Amino acid sequence: MLQGKAALITGSATGIGRSIALRLAEAGADVVINYSRSEKEARETQADAERFGVRTLLYKADVGDDQQIREMVQAAIDKFGRLDILVNNAGMTNFVEHADLEGLKEEYWDNAFNVNVKGMFFCCRAAAPELKKNKGCIVNITSIAGMTGLGSSIAYAASKAAAISVTKSLARVLAPEVRVNSVAPGVVDTRWVKGQEDHIQRLADGTPLGRVAAPEDVSEVAYSLITSAGFVTGQTIIVDGGMFI
């Protein structure tokens, strides 16, 4: 379905990003595997994507750095001759109890907003001309925390609320050529939540579907927004098993 298309997925070495990269590769898209620290895992994701017979580009870049992002986007265009899909998955948090106001250091605010908001915007801005030319699309991985105010920290929740707002703004200014949507997962079983198994089980028990999300639950929704939602833009799709009905 995506043969001849090219996709850039930030933070795609592990977890949700890896699942999205492999889902797009399975559909025939050439993919950029972006990472900042997890080179070993990124190379494994690259190898798994290439098993689908697509071309890949492994690229280390910090999404909070505008120049690195511009260079990555250009490298993708140079490699594949085009860019059609951008998935902003890279995320950052520091775990701080919400009641611990003094524990929420200024640097934690900077960390969250640099990656989750500014970095997402930098990627969209850098890719926009090529995406408009190819009538492409953007999917931003946000979070249910941006709607509930819950999550790993107050700063993280605020950053994801801002990311949802930026999604709406970009959907307006990049239309009609480019659709921009977001996917807002609840708790997802990735390495972010390792060591919190008891807490995760309690959350699962309180969810109508009786479990937390797997990365594939999120990637399938992202994939549907890319391939099957041609008249949907500016929307945020919640993937939380009904936790916050």
Image: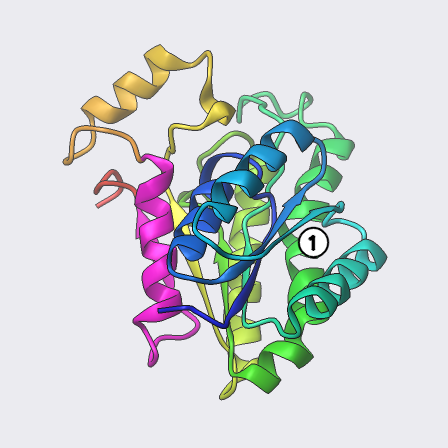
Q: Position of residue 194 (x, y in %)?
A: 46, 17
Is 132 placed left or right of 72 in the picture? left
Task: Please tell me whether mark 1 sits on a helix, a strand or a loop.
Answer: helix
Q: Is residue 153 magenta?
A: no
The colour scheme is: rainbow
**Quarter location, residue 41:** top right
- 69 to the left or right of 183: right
Identify residue for label 1.
Answer: 119
> What residue occupies the far right of the structure in this picture?
67
Figure check: 71 above or below 217:
below
The reply to whether the magenta stretch includes residue 232 is yes
Q: Is residue 61 left or right of residue 242?
A: right
For the N terminus, give its image quadrant.
bottom left
Q: How many marks?
A: 1
Residue for point 49% across, 72% down:
4
Of 152 and 225, the residue lying toward us? 225
Q: Does the image show residue 173? A: no
Q: Residue at x 24, y 25 (%)?
A: 204
Where in the figure is residue 146, as x and y percent of width and height? 47, 48
Towards the viewer: 17 or 243: 17
Q: In the rendered structure, which segment of residues is drawn in magenta?
A: 214-239
Q: Which residue is pictured at 73% across the width and 28% down the height?
A: 105
Q: Could you classify mark 1 by the number of other residues whose Cα lies within 10 Å: few (under 14), some (14-19), or many (20 or more)? A: many
As shown in the figure, which amino acid type bears the numbered disc 1? Gly
Q: Quick check: 191 above or below 55?
A: above
Q: Residue at x 72, y 50 (%)?
A: 63
Residue 188, image x and y in percent?
38, 33
Q: Is residue 199 visible?
A: yes
